[in-house]
Image: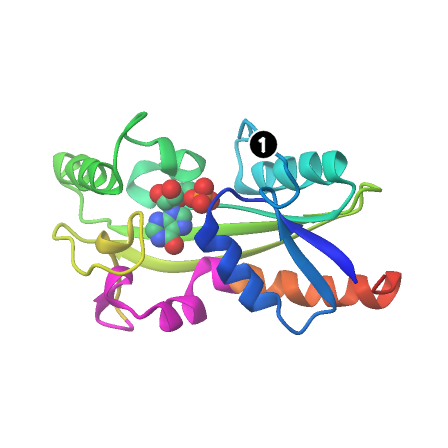
Amino acid sequence: MRKLLVATHNQGKILEYRSLLAGLPLEVTSLEAEGIALDVNETGVTFAENAVLKACTYARISGLWTWADDSGLEVDALDGAPGVYSARYAGPGASDRDRYLKLVDELQSMNTRDRAARFRCVVAICLPDGETITTDGHVEGEIVDEPRGSNGFGYDPVFYLSDHGATMAELSQETKNQISHRGHAARAAKLALAELIADRGAG
Ligand code: IMP
């Protein structure tokens, strides 16, 4: 069976993607299992650039079909920041809590009523011959001053979804997967993979 390298150092994502991709005739493997220690510098200025950079670098190194993603939070009042810098927003060594508190502080100091925000995710699939596919997903919400909930990670406690009357951190993992930026991008990428397999064969 053909191998698919899920190129992330995040074990949680590997598990999530492995379960999403079950049913496709692919053996999901990881950087760790392939003995790849290289870290790709995320030098892109868009989610798509970073996802493609990661997927194609690891596809070249491994010779395998490779899946990578990039995601983050865009806040309208901050002209789309933190965007691709979401993980680095409060500097090195900062925690998730440091980052969302900094974000709330910044919005409070602007005294703005515009709290619109969205999570975005791009999944890139790159083949060793250079063929590349990207899919994206997003989910709209608003940034609230009071963090709520303890599920999820990152900015989830301050990302409020009016349809659910809850922050992302108050949703179950199952509900988050159904509505999230990553869920949407990943399901579209799974369909694209199924087409690639139909075109190129499973082995
Ligand atoms: P990455 O794509 O996993 O590198 O995520 C980049 C950063 O965006 C994370 O470190 C989080 O700060 C933020 N982020 C991405 N997806 C989510 C999410 O589902 N919830 C909360 N924060 C997220």
Q: In this view of the protein, which residue sits in the foreground, 90 or 17?
A: 17
Look at the image and tell me in which quarter the N terminus lies. Answer: bottom right
Please check the rendered image and state whether residue 77 is part of the magenta-colored stretch, yes or no: no
User: At 52% across and 54% down in the image, what residue appears?
Assistant: 14
Using the image, determine if residue 199 lies above or below residue 103. below
Residue 198 on image: x %, y %:
83, 68
Residue 193, percent from left and from top: 72, 62
Is residue 176 covered in magenta? yes
Colouring method of the image? rainbow
Q: Position of residue 80 (x, y in %)?
A: 38, 40
Mark 1 lies on residue = 37
Magenta segment, principal secondary structure? helix
Q: Is residue 50 visible?
A: yes
Quarter of the rendering occupied by the C terminus? bottom right
Q: Nearer the viewer, residue 33 or 26?
A: 33
Give the residues drawn in magenta, as a range.
163-183
Q: Nearer the viewer, residue 62 or 116?
A: 62
Question: In the rendered view, does 117 fall on the left or right side of 67?
Answer: left
Residue at 41 percent of width and 60 percent of height: 139
Residue 32, image quadrant = top right
The answer to which image quadrant residue 51 occupies is: top right
**Residue depicted at x 30% and y 25%:** 91
